[in-house]
Image: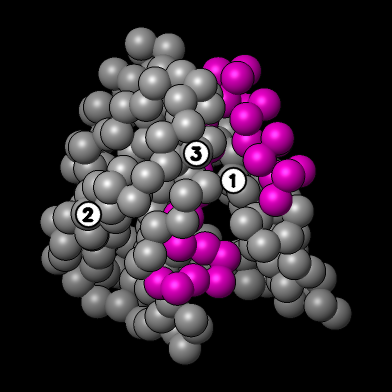
Amino acid sequence: MKSLLEHSAGDIVRLLASTWRLETHGDAQIRMLRDAGTPVVFTVWHAFLLPPLWHRKDEGITLLISDHGDAGYLARAALRWGYRVVRGSSTRGAVKGTKGILRTLASGGDVALTPDGPTGPARVVKPGAVTIAARAGAAVVPIGAGASSWWQLGSWDRFFVPRPFSKVRVVYGKPMLTERHSSRTDEATLGVLGQRLDKATESAAC
């Protein structure tokens, strides 16, 4: 029964997203990074994850999803949307998750991370995304999302779900370039990423 409900939830989200009037800004720079052979670490505040997931579906991007059992439904839904999944997080399965993400970047693939996930605090950057990007020489791309009409769930991050037929905007902010094998994760660097995520989110307001 649980599996059936999870399957149905994925279909409902897909149906909902298919009604959105989606517009994007700044995604030309993603093509430039890929053409240059630079691996990409997409970052988005956990609350605004859904619209970028829909926009970049079927590209084979690798997601880091918590090892916690409750996140299993998200992992299965992501696979159905054409993502690859590595299980682990900053709180559970951290070493396994980091190794899987680094393997993806080393092979030329892109990954997506939520720097304030999986449990918050909301909109506070943890060092994981910057650390991983620096070790791989990847570009960190901040993403923001907004909608003309939406629901907010009662979760720790007030998860954002655009309503049916709403205008949805996804904004790709200025990438942060890293030096390969660098370990630069000081507070200033994390602060810059947080500012760029906030700016992209504000720019996405409809």
Q: Nearer the viewer, residue 104 or 32?
A: 104
The N terminus appears in which quarter of the rendering? bottom right
Residue furthest front in the image: 186
Q: Give the residue type at disc 3.
A: Thr
**What secondary structure is found at the residue carrying circle 2?**
helix
Q: How many marks?
A: 3
Residue at 36% over, 11% down:
36
Mark 2: few, some, or many residues within 10 Å (few <14, many ≥20)?
some
Label 2 vs label 3: CA separation?
17 Å
Residue at 75% over, 67% down:
68
> In this orientation, does residue 53 appear?
no
Vertical order, 35 against 79 (above or below):
above
**Image check: 206 left or right of 135?**
left
Vertical order, 28 against 79 (above or below):
above
Label 3 vs label 1: CA separation?
16 Å
Q: Give the residue type at disc 1.
A: Leu
- The residue that disc 2 covers is 195
Vertical order, 196 against 46 (above or below):
above
**Marks 2 & 3, CB-CB < 8 Å contact:** no
**Between disc 3 and disc 1, whose residue precedes?**
1
Q: Position of residue 32 (x, y in %)?
A: 29, 18
Whether residue 107 appears in magenta in the rendering, the answer is yes
- The residue that disc 3 covers is 131
Q: Give the residue type at disc 2.
A: Gln
- Stretch of the chain drawn in magenta: 94-122
